[in-house]
Image: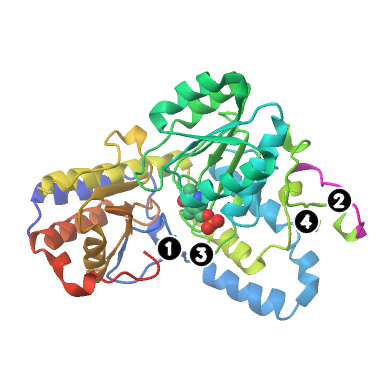
Amino acid sequence: MSVPPALSRRAADLDRASALGDTRTRFCLPEGVIYLDGNSLGALPAAVPGVVHEVVARQWGERLIRSWNESDWWGAPERVGDRVGSLVGAAPGQVVVTDSTSVNLFKVFVAASRLRAGRRVVLTDGASFPTDLYVLAAASRLVELEVVPVTHAEAAGAIAEYADRLAFIAFSQVDYRTGELWDLPGLTRSAHEAGALACWDLCHSAGVHPVGLDEHAVDFAVGCGYKYLNGGPGAPAFVYVATRHQADFDHPLTGWQGHASPFAMSPDYVPAEGITRARTGTAPLLSLLALEAALTAYDGLDIADVRAQSQSLTGFFLECLAGLGLDLPVVTPRDAGRRGSQVSLRHPQAYAVVQALIARGVIGDFREPDIIRLGFAPLYLTHADVLESARHLAEVLAHNEFDRPEFAARAAVT
Ligand SMILES: *Cc1c(COP(=O)(O)O)cnc(C)c1O
């Protein structure tokens, strides 16, 4: 299929105008692949292999247990937390990298409920990522909360309605399936006006959106290390506890690494000062230090420029769909101010379409029931890649390539 020359020129113009410059060289990407799945597992930053080798061979292999002090393994959760914090608008001392998102959600939900003991209602998105719902249900059984599901459109009204019965809101800033950006500043403000707290899941916004946790007075937040932050498979997650809540942050997983003096080996738990009390057990150091190296891909970048590039890439993808005559229903808001860093499309054969794209080297993913989900990681994608991926999609659809039997079989991970 030939591409209209105007689209090719526009891709080149947009790439020249990008404020990020050539950040793609900060990543190792295989030849012939256009990677549209950085919202699920980020690509490998070029700084990571060398650091992992050094950590394994020298820090672990040679220095052994001395590295806890010599290489400050002990302080890594807070050190890397501050670097993550700088990408989500949090001043130092409020973010720690620890555990998984699921585990951190549990800590935050129970702690938030204890801070609003007289109030028992929690508002959440009923279409949220399942782990957020499962963990909220489990926390609710423990601390007797009533979970009320609402849509984005209903959220502000529900906050006003539940008013002094509302303990906290628990939403994702970006819907993992549709890519819709929720109104974090506005809903946080409304929750506070009702005397409630705001917990935000940043899994699909950390690293691609400025978020502004401090600016918007968010109370608690969590997020993944392995999506746009590129920390690698199974990278630990992060948790943000605003300074004003730290002294009262009473979470349920009180392990020794959140203790005020862990090496006193006292039988009684005394929480550490500051964000350290959100730690539980020993961190997965190899993964944590891989994440630290990965975050150097953001060195010298302004997160506002990253957001601008993300909006430009997703916006250009929509332009390409129109320019190539593709009229699949677009699930993601067309207004750039209302979308995250992905574009989701509907197709009755979405799974097979994604498999056909992968066979052509365009890696995206499928989400139930009929969503083709394409993530646009601004640090390593160009507008030329965007146009090329739209061209492949047009060819897959024009030739019904998705009908081939080999694209129907589902793997364990979709
Ligand atoms: C990816 C994702 C998670 C993953 O949680 P883990 O505990 O790291 O497996 C949770 N919530 C949301 C919204 C996500 O997008």
Q: Give the range drawn in magenta.
A: 264-274
Point out residue 97 in the picture as x, y percentages from the top left corner. 64, 53
Give the residue type that dot 1 points to: Ala
Nearest to viewer (mark 2 / mark 1): 2
Give the labeled residue for mark 4.
255
Indicate yes or no: mark 4 CB to ligand 1 under 8 Å. Answer: no
Q: Earlier in the sequence, mark 2 or mark 1?
A: 1
Find the distance from the CA under tag 4 to the CA under tag 1: 32 Å
Image height of 68 relative to 85, above or below: below
Using a 10 Å C-alpha cutoff, classify the residue at mark 3 as few (fewer than 14 neighbours), some (14 to 19) or many (20 or more): many
The N terminus appears in which quarter of the rendering? Answer: bottom left
Under circle 3, the secondary element is loop
Can residue 243 be seen here?
Answer: no
Q: In which quarter of the image is residue 406?
A: bottom left
Mark 4: amino acid? Gly
- Return the residue nearer the eye: 35 or 102: 102
> Which residue is denoted by mark 2 in the rendering?
269
Residue flagged by tag 3: what amino acid is it?
A: Gly
273 inside magenta stretch:
yes
The CA span between labels 2 and 4 is 8 Å
Q: Which color scheme does this rendered protein use?
A: rainbow
Label 4 close to label 1 by CB (< 8 Å): no
Q: Is mark 2 within 8 Å of ligand 1?
A: no
Q: Mark 3 points at which residue?
A: 232
Left or right, residue 253 beside residue 296:
right
Task: Kindly report the distance in space between the C-alpha atoms of the residues bearing marks 2 and 1.
Answer: 40 Å
Secondary structure under the numbered disc 1 in the rendered image: loop
Q: Which of 397 and 225 is in front in this view?
A: 397
- Quickly name the residue at label 1: 43
